[in-house]
Amino acid sequence: MDPFEMQTIVNGELLHGEHAVWYGQPAPQEFSKEALPLFLFGIPWTLFSVGWTAMSFWITSDTEGLFRFVFPLFGLPFVAIGIYLLASPILKARKAGMTLYAVTDRRALIIDLSGSTKKVTAYGPAEIKNIERVEKADGSGHLYFRTEFTTDSDKNTISRKVGFLGIPEVRTVEMYIRDFLK
């Protein structure tokens, strides 16, 4: 996304009298790193699924009737899942390219353009708690400003940090957020 397009999108989300002080996008490799465990799990999954499906076609090649086609087709959904797991780093990098972060003089915005609709999540002073900066040597990093809690089907509490991932000059962005919190 070019800077003019980003600025146009951010300006379209501003409230009356609000001004953008910073906007940017996450580094795609930061989103791809999240998918590395899925990718690694996808390697043996896909190999097994393809092997299963290929062997079932081979084993049933002498069989007559419906069984010849049904048994091998059972493996195809597993092959599709494997392909998805192997593609997950690419899909996450694409999502990063469709995500936009912005800080205004009143709020922090996360704008997700990856789906068929635009999803805008705004965090004002009341929603921002416990700012945490994770900074690399080059000054880039993650800026977390909220922890959200959900409950899974087993009634276990799951926490998820919310913020800006893989942004340049993370310390400067933190300063902008702290300025509107004053």
Image (cartoon, grey):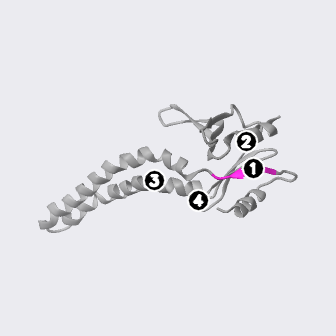
Which amino acid is tagged 4?
Answer: Gly
Q: Measuring 40% from the left and 54% from the top, which residue is drawn there? A: 86
Q: Quadrant of residue 169?
A: top right
Tell which of 27 and 117 is nearer to you: 27
Q: Which residue is mark 3?
A: 88
The amino acid type found where label 2 is placed reads: Thr
Label 1 secondary element: strand
At label 1, the amino acid type is Trp
The answer for how far apart the CA atoms under marks 1 and 4 are is 24 Å
Asked whether the beta carbons under mark 4 and mark 3 sit within 8 Å of each other, the answer is no
Closer to us: mark 1 or mark 4?
1
User: Disc 3 residue type?
Assistant: Ser
Contact flag, marks 2 and 1 (Cβ < 8 Å)? yes
Q: Which residues are magenta?
A: 20-25
Q: Which residue is mark 1?
A: 22
Residue highlighted by disc 4 = 115
- Look at discs 4 and 3 and give the one toward the viewer: 3
Q: Of the residues under marks 3 and 2, which one precedes in the sequence?
A: 3
Residue at which label 2 appears: 172
- Mark 1 residue crowding within 10 angstroms, few (<14) / some (14–19) / many (20+): some
